[in-house]
Amino acid sequence: MAIESVLLNVRDIARSVEFYQRHFDAVVIETGDDRAELDLVTARLHLTRIDSPAGSTWIGDDLQRGFRHVGFKVSDLDVRVAALHEAEVPFHLEPIHAEGGVRITFFYDPDGTLLELVEGPLQYHEVYDREAVEQDWALGDPQRPRFDHVAATVEDLEATKEHYAELGYVLMSGIHQPSDDRGFEINFLRSGDSSLEVFTYERAEKESRVAQLDEPGFVGVEFGGSTAKGSGTVVGSALGRDVYADPDGLNYVLASA
């Protein structure tokens, strides 16, 4: 069940549509006063307007379990970063060379969702499923920014693997972070043309978070391509469907049959 859509709450539909068109070359599928749907090559972006948003409890330190960021592959990172700076978009991390031989940068959309751009094919330190890695690399350099992954911090990698195996995910690969004294590791679960990027911290305390569906920013992901049932806890509804939370509070819905 690959990620079919990413769901975001926004305060202003027109503002968010313009942001993703300008900086991600997103293609508008449909848009209105309350909702919009955009194409991001390998997935869609669902935007829902909220009138009186709750205060967000999301913390951007990666030690809060659950959602961390939405990642995109690009072939022109410096050009994208220059345009973001010109538009005075707030950055979380300026471009750096990262483990795995890629260049990355982090910044925020108008409603505070943390976004990542990745340039270059990841050279994984550990390969657990060679076929999945080859399919990943075969996607090549994107002509326009391509949705690549949603990242989440988890308490127990084995429990996460087991949960998402029921939704068709395999453990594809891993990247070590030897300079991080918190025992930070990144593993990738793969289905289709995108990944769940899983953060673990062996030597650091993690913080739990109660699911919020009425805050600005990330709501969850939509899994498609199967009739499997969600095995998480139902925490609310979105797109007229149940929202499930995995063991660490990452929310998801299942595509309509």
Image (spheres, helix red, strand yellow):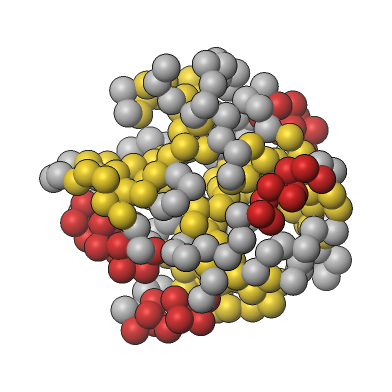
Q: Is residue 14 left or right of residue 98?
A: left
- Residue at 61 percent of width and 55 percent of height: 139
Q: Is residue 190 left or right of residue 59?
A: right
Q: Residue furthest left?
A: 33
One can see residue 94 in this view = yes
Q: Position of residue 71 (x, y in %)?
A: 54, 57
Residue 166 to residue 193: above or below: above
Q: Quadrant of the C terminus?
A: top left
Q: Which one is nearer the viewer's eye here, 200 or 147?
A: 147
Q: Which one is nearer the viewer's eye here, 16 or 216?
A: 16
- Total labels drawn: 0
Q: Position of residue 38 (x, y in %)?
A: 32, 49
- Residue at 56 percent of width and 53 percent of height: 148
Q: Which one is nearer the viewer's eye here, 226 or 175?
A: 226
- Residue at 42 percent of width and 83 percent of height: 82
- Residue at 42 percent of width and 56 percent of height: 113
Q: Quadrant of the N terminus?
A: top right
Q: Which one is nearer the viewer's eye here, 187 or 136?
A: 136
Residue 139 to residue 170: above or below: below
Q: Position of residue 134 (x, y in %)?
A: 74, 50
Quadrant in the picture for residue 138: bottom right
Q: Position of residue 96 (x, y in %)?
A: 64, 78
One can see residue 187 in this view = no
